[in-house]
Image: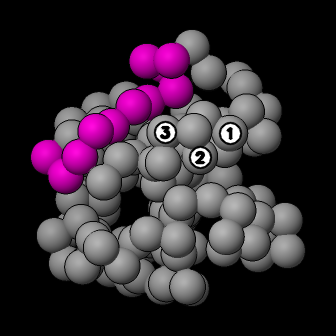
Amino acid sequence: MNFFIDTNLPYSSKDIFCKYGKTWHTQDVNLQGASDTDILRFAIQKKAILITRDLEFGNPYLYPRKSHCGLIIVRVPFYFTAKQINKTLKDFLTSVNREKLKNTITVVEPGKIRMRG
């Protein structure tokens, strides 16, 4: 399983996902500040699940299920530190069947997970 982490998440989040498959952060591939289209294009090219805080990716009309390999939308308060975000992600990854992340839109909040497939 491959993962691609958007600019709006800490670079340190990459360490959490590396345990579960090949992982890139936008900083690794010079896509910081890139358009949503370019971000999604890279994720599709690498057959990666995109992890982002960008709520627009959760719109199934703009990004229908078959248009991507999977989306994880992280909804945490704006004041969360990298440490708090990473704890939320770690808790999520240890509590979910990761195979079910493929081709779904998953919304992750502290203590809450919603999946639309």
CA–CA distance in space, label 3 to label 1: 9 Å
Q: Nearer the viewer, residue 88 or 62?
A: 62
Q: Residue 41 carries which label?
A: 1
Report which quarter residue 41 is drawn in. Answer: top right
Q: Do the residues labelled 3 and 1 touch (CB within 8 Å)?
A: no
Q: Where is residue 50 in the image (x, y as percent from the top left)?
A: 52, 51
Residue beneath the point at 75% across and 41% down:
36
Cβ–Cβ below 8 Å for labels 2 and 1? yes
At a point 21% along the width and 41% down the height, the residue shown is: 18
Q: Give the range drawn in magenta.
A: 19-29
The question of residue 14 being in magenta is answered with: no
Which callout, 3 or 1, points at the residue further toward the start of the chain? 1
Percent across and percent down for residue 68 are 62, 59
Residue pointed to by mark 3: 46
On screen, residue 6 versus residue 113, left or right, reads: right
Q: In this view, does 68 lie to the left or right of 75?
A: right
The amino acid pointed to by label 2 is Ile
Residue placed under numbered mark 2 in the picture: 44
Query: Label 3 amino acid?
Result: Lys
From the viewer's perspective, is residue 30 above or below residue 95?
above
Q: In which quarter of the image is the C terminus?
A: bottom right
